[in-house]
C-alpha cells in the first residue's frame, strides 16, 4: 500500500477536488451558479457563516451569522467532522467526514477557491 501511494502520489488539491465531488450536488464554487439545494460556497474562508446573501438559511445558521461567526480553516475542519454537532438543527443532512486527511484536503481545496 505504501509503495503504491509512493508510486502514484495524488496532490492534496486532487484529493480535495475528489472529496468535494459529493458536496457538488448541493454546492457550487462558481459565484454565478445558482439554484442548487445548498448555499454558494465561493470565497467561503473568511466569509461570515451563512454569508450567501441569496440563500435562505436555517435559524441556527442565521443565529451564528448574527453572532458574527466567520469561516476559517479551523472552524471548517471541525464543521466537516460533524456538521450537526456544531450547529444543531442544521438543514444539511450529511454525515461528518471522519478521515482527518480527507477533511484537510477538502478544507485546502475550499480555501484555494476563496482566492480565485
Ligand atoms: C444534500 C445537500 C448537501 C450536501 C451533499 C452538502 N451540503 Fe453543505 N449545505 C447544504 C445546505 C442545505 C446548507 C444550509 C444549511 C442550513 O441553512 O442550515 C449547507 C451549508 C453548508 C455550509 C455553510 C455555508 C455558509 O454559507 O455558511 C458549508 C461550509 C457546507 N455546507 C459545506 C459542505 C461540504 C464541504 C459538503 C461536502 C462534504 C457539503 N456541504 C455537502 C446542503 C448540502
Image (cartoon, grey):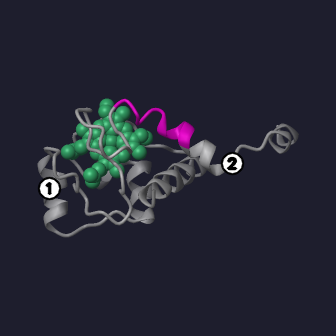
Tell me, yes or no, whether the highlighted magenta stretch contains residue 21: yes
Is residue 103 placed above or below 65 in the rendered structure?
A: above
How far separated are the C-alphas under marks 1 and 2?
A: 35 Å
Relative to 104, 41 lies left or right: left
Identify the residue shown where x is 25% and y is 63%: 48
Residue 31 shows in the view: yes
- Residue 103 in the image, given as x and y percentages of width and height: 52, 50
Residues shaded magenta: 17-25
* Camera-side residue of 52 and 86: 52
- Residue 61 in the image, given as x and y percentages of width and height: 19, 53
Relative to 101, 76 lies left or right: left
Local secondary structure at mark 2: loop
In the image, ligand 1 is in what quadrant?
Answer: top left
Ligand 1 closer than 8 Å to label 2 CB: no
Is residue 66 placed above or below 61 in the rendered structure?
A: below
Where residue 11 is drawn, which disc sits there? Answer: 2
Identify the residue shown where x is 47% and y is 58%: 111
Q: Quadrant of residue 3?
A: top right
Identify the residue shown where x is 52% and y is 51%: 109
Residue 92 shows in the view: no
Ligand 1 closer than 8 Å to label 1 CB: yes
Amino acid at each position: 500500500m505504501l509503495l503504491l501511494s509512493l508510486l502514484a502520489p495524488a496532490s492534496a488539491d486532487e484529493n480535495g477536488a475528489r472529496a468535494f465531488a459529493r458536496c457538488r450536488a448541493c454546492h457550487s464554487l462558481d459565484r454565478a451558479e445558482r439554484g442548487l439545494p445548498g448555499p454558494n460556497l465561493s470565497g467561503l474562508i473568511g466569509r461570515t457563516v451563512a454569508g450567501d446573501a441569496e440563500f435562505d438559511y436555517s435559524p441556527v445558521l442565521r443565529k451564528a451569522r448574527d453572532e458574527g461567526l466567520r469561516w476559517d480553516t479551523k472552524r471548517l475542519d471541525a464543521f466537516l467532522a460533524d456538521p450537526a454537532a456544531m450547529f444543531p438543527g442544521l438543514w444539511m443532512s450529511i454525515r461528518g467526514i471522519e478521515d482527518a486527511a480527507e477533511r484537510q484536503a477538502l478544507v485546502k481545496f475550499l480555501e484555494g477557491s476563496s482566492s480565485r
